[in-house]
Image (spheres, rainbow, N blue to C red):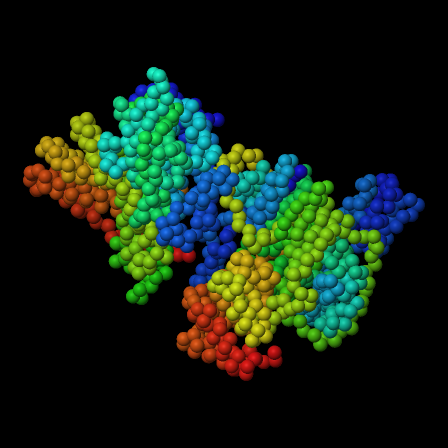
């Protein structure tokens, strides 16, 4: 069984700050990490691998040369081989151009029974690349999957998270699954033996030609969407701190909210 | 560019006939023939085992942009109910369409469809494309994506909006990729400038805002979070309705629904719809402690929400989660208790009209996005607030 | 791909061994980065501060937690320090220092527990027969056995010669089948929880190491010590009452090899404790720098006030950077097979642990009231790091060792030892003139004068003089290596500082070291012997060193400003 897991190196957006003077993103000192959703997807794949003895997991990433780090981490966690799609041609890709490149690479690899993706990357937050890849590869998709399993006849089942509950879906292979971690998920730390093994696992760097894609579909020129401008979210205005001890402050606030019709109106 | 059956290769197996969502292929003298209903969705190609269908997808980039007109909305239904997001998006579409001088089109599928014409029109829809078949009541990608793609290809709207719900985020990128067009996710702002749709959205976990455009390609597609735009009824349109001609046998062959588990009560109000929300975060320390928030919420006639910290700790269900990876809320009043106010939480609650923050740390970021703040122990302040409200509202 | 074990490693005689035996192949930087990241992530998830503070409060040893860290699938941390051929991962000395530093940053008690197992393995790794290595090192690697290094006794701490634990031969016919060991051991790390103890005992001709399973009948364990610091480490005393140990467990299969087996690794083990001091001290320092950028007093951030930074931050940052440079220098030399470097290891241990302790102490002061409460961690670090001045050889023993060695070298080289070092600095200064090498050149020349005075007046009859010479030699050599390090084209990735800052730091250290060496050296000679103060001052060129202090405050300002950028407040 062949599994491909798509991973991305992202800045740790929980640590990113805005410079109050220039209103721009301060990225220095912010660590680059393996996208947590992707790590969860990888661990789901590793779980399936542990239950069988015929699973090969390839990790695939599109990124700059330093994305090697997240591929090595994935190998250290137990993936079998890695491919980094890295080429200046990919610069400026939006989700469409990214999906074109990644699905091209998947085809070049000969496809897979299951393609795992994290639901979304914590920098882009779009959740688009997975489904777009599935469409380009012409395979079904199971999104928002919290847990994946295989039936005895090798169909893929996923517990799909919904706003008001969940449902269990079953799909034929090949299929693309986008994963969302359970609230209790704690990402594994690559153990020492895994790290040493990782350094000698197959690792390749592919350029844009390997995707077999039309160059006009890649990178900035291949991206139908563009960023016109970025800016910091508008501030809300000065907060009014309510003075006084607990009792006084609570009373003042309650009175204030009622007086201004924010509470106690048409309810 | 276009689609063609290569007669010499066609063996007459009729697989393409069965595989066309729009019933656009028929057999003539043992060979397949493509009729005028064809929308160029390309679904037939993968069914043909004889390589007899030549298909070149029209490239979004090569088209004449001015020929695309109409602001369309994918209206989500669940189990036979039209979702509120549909009304929010149709209202927004109406606003955009008025500026562009175009019409608003709504797509709605499932048993809820016929009942919804009125309300969709009331919110500004000029046209409704629908199917009332019950097989659309439970969303499956393979059922809806080719359908939506086909409709869009045929009718050429300039803008298509989807709700950024689980369904919308499953469907919209699938459609966008099939049309080779751009898609902007989770928009919190949509405006028109020089005939172009400006799509504003948070990025980097909500740390910055970005304005995205799709200058060359049509249609321009975006997903929009529920509770960002307000539904505005009273427009009073009576829409033209068109039932989609569907291939009866056409369905998602690859994916089946095995089981459905509903955790919230049918029709129960989620926090997305509450007017007053009292939220708890890391400062709550336990699931039991949420009781004080529930009491305050009850006094105010509202609901209880939670930050990601509280959900990850297992104190509250995920359906209560407010934030970047949770729900967007826009109540009249949001009281954040023991929530530090990380940017990812702010993204979810920014739409609240009035924000009150209660935290024992005066430096907590939540105070930067609050209108009123009290520095103190929430386990003292919240009960005191509750008491004060009950008294002032007259034994409420 | 295991490196072949060189001849001379199948031990039978007491010749000193090269470190290269069972040599560790090193990791490349990527591998090392992944390893250190895993350690940090693991600690963040499993060893949060509140948990560590709780265990510290209770004096509780996290046995399950430690065992979990040894699981191959979870972290396998112990494998790092075990050679590849026995199932370990084969870190180099350099890799090991980085790992030890990181462990110390997490918790020095846990670091001690992990390190103690490794230390306990040492006699086996360097002195055991191939069979013994095959069995025991492999078992530790595979099963995650906890080991203790049981040498110290109540009356034999620094002085192993005073050992009273004895091992008497047990015969069957005329064959030795085992030994009966009696005696008590004290202050043994992991003593109460180890699976096996490496016990040092007196035999007929000298001392020997024995592998003693912890459940051997006749061992009585004391209660874990209630300690000032490293309270997460298990430290006990135990007594052995005529316990039986089979002859296969005599390390090396021959009696009397014990001391050389112990000493052989001193260079390495001392270096690891130096790394501990560096790690703990650096952790404390970094907390101060982050804190001081948020704390406003008297209209400004503490971080912008000289009275604060130039006393509580800069000198410590400088000393810790110098310690790191020296540790790395020695680590590389050990990895290159440049001998066992026991004296250099002693210098590293001495200087680094003193620097770590000073930094931790300053950290409490720097955080004021917050530094005094447990929650802010620095008082725990201060309590923890104290042990590094005591174990693995007290710092007084280090002074003695350094002094003895350098004294002998001074004599053997006919008083050119420090002269040569001085010339080395002069040559450096000609190439790179802004790392303070000129000050060190003067200092080393001056140190030579002091050593010479001591020789001429036979002042080393005074033990006080010997110890002081040890202290001054350490100061000199560390500062010298720091100058050389700062002058390099590239710094190791462990240094978070840029060129300007490194060079300023080297200058500061050079000025301070030179001043101390000359002033205290002259005082020493005057105090123990006789001499003309004026002549001494001229000969050592004391005045030039005083003049060289020029620019000190400016350099300190630079370090204070730049260190803010390196350790930003969160």
Q: Identify the residue at horizontal 31%, vertical 48% (top origin).
A: C227
Where is residue A102? Give x, y as percent: 63, 45
Q: Identify the residue at horizontal 62%, vertical 58% (top origin).
A: B185
Q: Nearer the viewer, residue C276 or B369?
A: C276
As drawn, A251 above or below A156: below
Where is residue C432? Give x, y as percent: 29, 39
Q: Is residue C104 left or right of residue A31?
A: left
Q: Nearer the viewer, residue A79 or C526?
A: A79
Task: Report the number of discs.
Answer: 0
Q: Identify the residue at horizontal 24%, vertical 50% (top origin).
A: C552
**Quadrant in the picture for residue B82:** bottom right
Whether residue C326 is visible here, answered yes or no, is: no
Q: Going by the picture, which residue comes out furthest to the right?
A: B29
Q: Is residue B209 left or right of residue C421?
A: right
Where is residue C500? Give x, y as percent: 33, 47
Q: Is residue C59 left or right of residue B181?
A: left
Q: Is residue B340 left or right of residue C535?
A: right
Q: Nearer the viewer, residue C253 or B344?
A: C253
Q: Going by the picture, which residue comes out furthest to the top?
A: C174
Q: Identify the residue at horizontal 51%, vertical 55% (top origin).
A: A13
Q: Nearer the viewer, residue C472 or C66?
A: C66
Which quadrant of the figure contains the C terminus of chain C? bottom left
Whether residue B288 is visible here, answered yes or no, is: yes
Where is residue A85? Give x, y as percent: 59, 42
């Amino acid at each position: 069984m062949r599994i491909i897991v798509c991973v991305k190196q992202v800045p740790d957006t929980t640590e990113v700050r805005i410079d109050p003077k220039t209103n721009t993103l301060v990225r220095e000192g912010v660590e680059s990490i393996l996208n947590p959703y992707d790590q969860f997807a990888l661990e789901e794949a590793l779980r399936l691998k542990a239950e069988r003895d015929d699973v090969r997991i390839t990790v695939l990433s599109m990124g700059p040369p330093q994305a090697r780090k997240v591929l090595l981490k994935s190998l250290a966690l137990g993936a079998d081989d890695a491919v980094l799609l890295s080429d200046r041609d990919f610069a400026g890709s939006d989700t469409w151009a990214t999906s074109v490149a990644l699905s091209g690479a998947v085809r070049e690899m000969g496809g897979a029974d299951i393609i795992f993706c994290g639901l979304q990357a914590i920098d882009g937050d779009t959740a688009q690349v997975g489904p777009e890849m599935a469409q380009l590869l012409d395979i079904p998709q199971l999104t928002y999957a919290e847990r994946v399993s295989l039936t005895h006849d090798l169909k893929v089942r996923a517990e799909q998270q919904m706003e008001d509950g969940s449902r269990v879906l079953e799909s034929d292979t090949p299929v693309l699954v986008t994963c969302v971690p359970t609230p209790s998920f704690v990402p594994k730390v690559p153990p020492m033996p895994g790290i040493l093994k990782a350094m000698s696992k197959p690792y390749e760097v592919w350029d844009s030609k390997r995707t077999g894609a039309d160059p006009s579909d890649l990178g900035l020129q291949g991206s139908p969407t563009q960023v016109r401008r970025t800016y910091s979210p508008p501030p809300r205005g000065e907060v009014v701190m309510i003075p006084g001890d607990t009792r006084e402050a609570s009373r003042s606030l309650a009175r204030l909210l009622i007086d201004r019709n924010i509470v106690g109106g048409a309810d | 560019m276009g689609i063609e059956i290569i007669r010499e290769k066609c063996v007459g197996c009729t697989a393409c006939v069965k595989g066309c969502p729009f019933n656009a292929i028929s057999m003539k003298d043992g060979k397949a023939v493509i009729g005028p209903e064809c929308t160029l969705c390309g679904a037939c190609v993968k069914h043909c085992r004889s390589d007899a269908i030549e298909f070149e997808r029209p490239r979004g980039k090569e088209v004449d942009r001015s020929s695309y007109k109409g602001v369309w909305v994918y209206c989500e239904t669940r189990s036979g109910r039209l979702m509120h997001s549909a009304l929010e998006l149709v209202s927004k579409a109406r606003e955009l369409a008025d500026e562009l001088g175009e019409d608003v089109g709504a797509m709605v599928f499932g048993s809820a469809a016929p009942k919804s014409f009125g309300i969709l029109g009331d919110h500004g829809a000029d046209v409704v494309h629908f199917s009332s078949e019950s097989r659309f009541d439970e969303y499956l990608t393979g059922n809806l994506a080719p359908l939506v793609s086909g409709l869009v290809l045929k009718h050429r709207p300039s803008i298509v909006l989807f709700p950024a719900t689980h369904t919308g985020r499953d469907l919209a990128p699938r459609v966008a990729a099939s049309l080779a067009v751009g898609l902007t996710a989770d928009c919190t702002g949509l405006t028109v400038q020089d005939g172009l749709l400006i799509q504003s959205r948070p990025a980097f976990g909500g740390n910055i805002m970005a304005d995205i455009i799709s200058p060359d390609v049509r249609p321009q597609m975006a997903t929009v979070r529920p509770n960002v735009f307000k539904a505005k009824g009273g427009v009073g349109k009576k829409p033209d309705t068109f039932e989609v001609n569907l291939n009866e046998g056409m369905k998602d062959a690859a994916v089946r629904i095995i089981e459905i588990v509903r955790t919230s009560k049918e029709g129960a109000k989620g926090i997305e719809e509450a007017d007053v929300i009292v939220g708890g975060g890391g400062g709550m320390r336990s699931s039991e402690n949420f009781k004080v928030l529930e009491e305050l919420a009850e006094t105010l006639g509202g609901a209880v929400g939670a930050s990601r910290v509280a959900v990850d700790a297992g104190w509250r269900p995920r359906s209560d989660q407010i934030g970047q990876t949770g729900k967007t809320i826009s109540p009249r009043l949001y009281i954040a208790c023991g929530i530090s106010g990380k940017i990812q939480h702010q993204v979810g609650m920014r739409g609240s009209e009035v924000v009150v923050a209660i935290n024992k740390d005066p430096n907590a970021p939540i105070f930067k996005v609050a209108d009123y703040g009290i520095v103190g122990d929430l386990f003292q302040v919240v009960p005191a607030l509750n008491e004060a409200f009950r008294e002032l509202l007259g034994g409420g | 791909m295991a490196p072949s074990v060189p001849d001379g490693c199948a031990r039978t005689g007491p010749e000193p061994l090269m470190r290269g035996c069972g040599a560790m192949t090193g990791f490349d930087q990527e591998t090392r980065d992944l390893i250190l990241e895993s350690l940090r992530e693991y600690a963040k998830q499993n060893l949060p501060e509140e948990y560590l503070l709780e265990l510290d409060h209770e004096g509780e040893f996290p046995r399950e937690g430690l065992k979990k860290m040894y699981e191959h699938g979870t972290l396998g941390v112990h494998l790092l320090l075990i050679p590849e051929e026995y199932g370990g991962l084969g870190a180099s000395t350099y890799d090991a220092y980085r790992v030890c530093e990181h462990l110390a940053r997490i918790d020095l008690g846990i670091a001690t527990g992990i390190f103690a197992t490794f230390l306990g393995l040492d006699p086996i790794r360097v002195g055991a027969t191939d069979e013994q290595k095959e069995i025991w090192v492999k078992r530790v690697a595979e099963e995650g056995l906890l080991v203790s290094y049981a040498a110290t006794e109540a009356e034999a701490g620094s002085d192993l010669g005073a050992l009273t634990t004895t091992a008497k031969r047990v015969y069957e016919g005329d064959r030795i089948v085992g030994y009966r060991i009696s005696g008590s051991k004290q202050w043994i790390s992991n003593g109460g929880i180890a699976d096996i103890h490496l016990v040092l005992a007196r035999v007929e001709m000298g001392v020997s190491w024995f592998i003693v399973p912890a459940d051997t009948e006749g061992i009585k364990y004391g209660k874990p010590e209630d300690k000032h610091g490293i309270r997460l480490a298990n430290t006990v005393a135990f007594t052995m009452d005529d316990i039986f140990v089979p002859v296969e467990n005599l390390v090396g299969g021959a009696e009397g090899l014990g001391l050389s087996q112990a000493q052989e690794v001193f260079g390495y083990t001392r270096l690891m404790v130096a790394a501990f001091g560096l790690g703990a001290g650096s952790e404390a320092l970094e907390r101060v720098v982050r804190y001081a950028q948020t704390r406003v007093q008297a209209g400004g951030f503490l971080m912008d006030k000289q009275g604060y930074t130039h006393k509580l931050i800069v000198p410590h940052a400088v000393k810790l950077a110098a310690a790191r440079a020296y540790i790395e220098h020695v680590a590389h030399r050990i990895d290159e097979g440049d001998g066992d470097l026991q004296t250099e290891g002693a210098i590293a241990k001495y200087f680094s642990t003193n620097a770590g302790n000073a930094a931790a102490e300053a950290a409490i002061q720097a955080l004021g009231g917050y530094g005094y409460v447990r929650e802010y961690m620095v008082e725990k670090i201060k309590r923890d790091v104290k042990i590094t001045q005591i174990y693995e050889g007290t710092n007084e023993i280090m002074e003695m060792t350094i002094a003895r060695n350098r004294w002998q070298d001074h004599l053997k080289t006919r008083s050119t030892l420090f002269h040569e070092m001085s010339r080395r600095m002069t040559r450096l200064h000609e190439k790179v003139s802004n790392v303070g090498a000129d000050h060190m050149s003067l200092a080393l020349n001056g140190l030579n004068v002091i050593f010479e005075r001591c020789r001429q007046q036979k002042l080393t009859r005074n033990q006080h003089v010997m110890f002081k010479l040890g202290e001054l030699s350490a100061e000199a050599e560390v500062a010298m290596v720091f100058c050389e390090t700062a002058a390099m084209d590239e710094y190791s990735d462990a240094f978070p500082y840029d060129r300007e800052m490194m060079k300023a730091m080297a200058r500061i250290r050079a000025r301070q070291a030179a001043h101390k060496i000359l002033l205290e050296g002259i005082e020493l000679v005057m105090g123990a012997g006789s001499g003309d103060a004026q002549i001494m001052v001229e000969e050592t060129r004391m005045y030039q060193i005083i003049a060289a202090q020029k620019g000190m405050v400016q350099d300190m300002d630079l370090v204070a400003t730049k260190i803010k950028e390196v350790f930003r407040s969160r």
